[in-house]
Image (cartoon, helix red, strand yellow):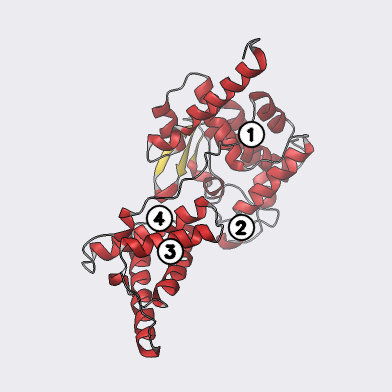
Amino acid sequence: MTTRTPDTDSGARLGSLWSAAIEQLEEDLRRRDSAPRTRRAYGVDLRQFAGWAATRGLSPADVDPKAVRRYIAGLSERNLAPSTSARKLAALRALFTSQREHGIISQNPADLVSSPRRPLVLPRVLSVRDAGRLLDGIPATGPLEVRDRAIFELAYSCGLRAEEIVSLRTADVDHDGEQLRVEGKGRKTRFVPVGEPAMAAVRVYLQGARQALVVPGPGPEAGGAGCEALFLSKTGRPLGTSDVRRRLRRWTARTGLDPCSPHALRHSFATHLLDGGADLRSIQELLGHASVSSTQIYTRVESARLRSAYTRSHPRA
């Protein structure tokens, strides 16, 4: 493959071609109901690649596997984490898949490039005892505390992502069926059973604490009477994921635990189910994983835990 430095006119033309390709992918992703955060991340990564390619005189149709490998290798030389390079490669695959589907190219050059190997990082998992300490350590002394207890009881009881917590509506709680309607990634809906402690915490929150946080007035966007969001901030607005993470850090510090994220509660939910005898397929459905391969990391967590226990306990380990 040969590259050439474009002149001003050809550079403008290349920029226009790359912009059109990225906009086409954005339309495709929006049509498929991809998450806004995914669309934004792909846009940033692809504009970086477009700039790199344009300075080498490459249009979307000119890019071949060698160019993609060269770009990914350059990221590694800049000491970017393998996970970052893998994410950028995923964005390229999506872009060229879009181009192929629209008949602009015949094959996807990024499909022939292997993803950088990422080190296996096992998720943080709380012990059953520490999960209980955390949840039982949140007092029911005021609306915010009652809300937080309901949030984190649900997060642990149902294995929720932070985004799923803040997108819950009051109508998503099925009190009679003791289950929760959850809208997960890709707008996929699942129904998850809710344990008794979590249901009790949600009922206490809805019976008084939530109303204390509602701002007078009909405006749902301001957390007024028409707001459907289940969990509200102290100013009456729907919570954001940063609010949930901040409150969890506060309560872990208050109970003497190491700081953890809402995802640690999700990991703990899955690991404790596996410890209790649940099968991977059931855990996959409860977590909302598209593939069981995503769920299999919890078998590695269990293996690592058993190995640690063996090393500590066996006289000839």
Q: Foreground mark, 4 or 1?
A: 4
Instruction: Name above or below for residue 42 compared with residue 270.
Output: below
Where disc 2 sits, the SS reads loop
Q: Foreground mark, 2 or 3?
A: 3
The amino acid on which the numbered mark 4 sits, given as a three-letter code, is Ala
**Mark 2 — residue?**
223
Left or right position of 251 against 41: right
**Mark 1 — residue?**
201
**Mark 3 — residue?**
71
Where disc 4 sits, the SS reads helix
2 and 4 marks in contact (CB < 8 Å): no
**Mark 4 — residue?**
90
The amino acid on which the numbered mark 1 sits, given as a three-letter code, is Ala
The amino acid on which the numbered mark 3 sits, given as a three-letter code, is Tyr
Left or right position of 101 against 305: left
Q: Distance between the residues labelled 1 and 3?
A: 51 Å
Front in this rendered view, residue 98 or 238? 98
Q: Give residue 135's mark.
A: none
Instruction: Name above or below for residue 34 compared with residue 45.
Output: above
